[in-house]
Image (cartoon, rainbow, N blue to C red):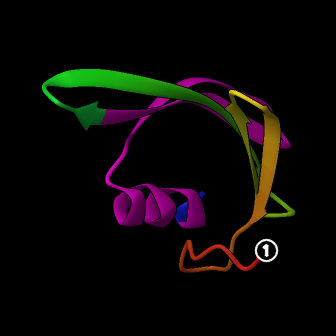
Amino acid sequence: MGPLVYYCRWQGAKLRLRGRDETAVWGHLVFQENNQERTQFFRYQLAEQTLTLNTDTGEQTIQLDKMGVAVS
């Protein structure tokens, strides 16, 4: 889960975990914008280190390296 925590730091987001199982964790990334919270649902696959974000246009999947940097 380390890459996810680093990714949140780089993006200026806080983690709000809602669940987990053997393969993944999910919840919301919380961003502070103009004194308001904006949340974005995510699912992080632990073994593959892939982060799937729900966006206005659908899902976006990002491959993270061990330091939480998006590599694809």
Q: What stretch is highlighted in magenta?
A: 3-31
Quarter-wise, where is residue 57 in the image?
A: top right
Q: Which residue is drawn at 58% across and 67% down?
A: 3
Q: Residue furthest left?
A: 35
Tell me: residue 22, above or below residue 71.
above
Q: Is residue 23 a member of the stretch shown in magenta?
A: yes
Q: Image check: 36 left or right of 54?
A: left
Binning the other alpha carbons within 10 Å of mark 1 as few (below 14), some (14 to 19) or many (20 upward) gives few
Mark 1 residue type:
Ser
Quarter holding the C terminus? bottom right
- Quadrant of the snapshot with the N terminus: bottom right
Q: According to the image, label 1 marks what residue?
A: 72
Left or right of 38 on screen, residue 44: right
Q: Is residue 42 magenta?
A: no
Residue at the location (22% across, 21% down)?
A: 36
| 26 or 52, nearer to the observer | 52
Looking at the image, which residue is at 82% across and 37% down?
59
Q: Is residue 58 above or below residue 11?
A: above
Total labels: the figure holds 1
Percent position of residue 17, x then y? 52, 28
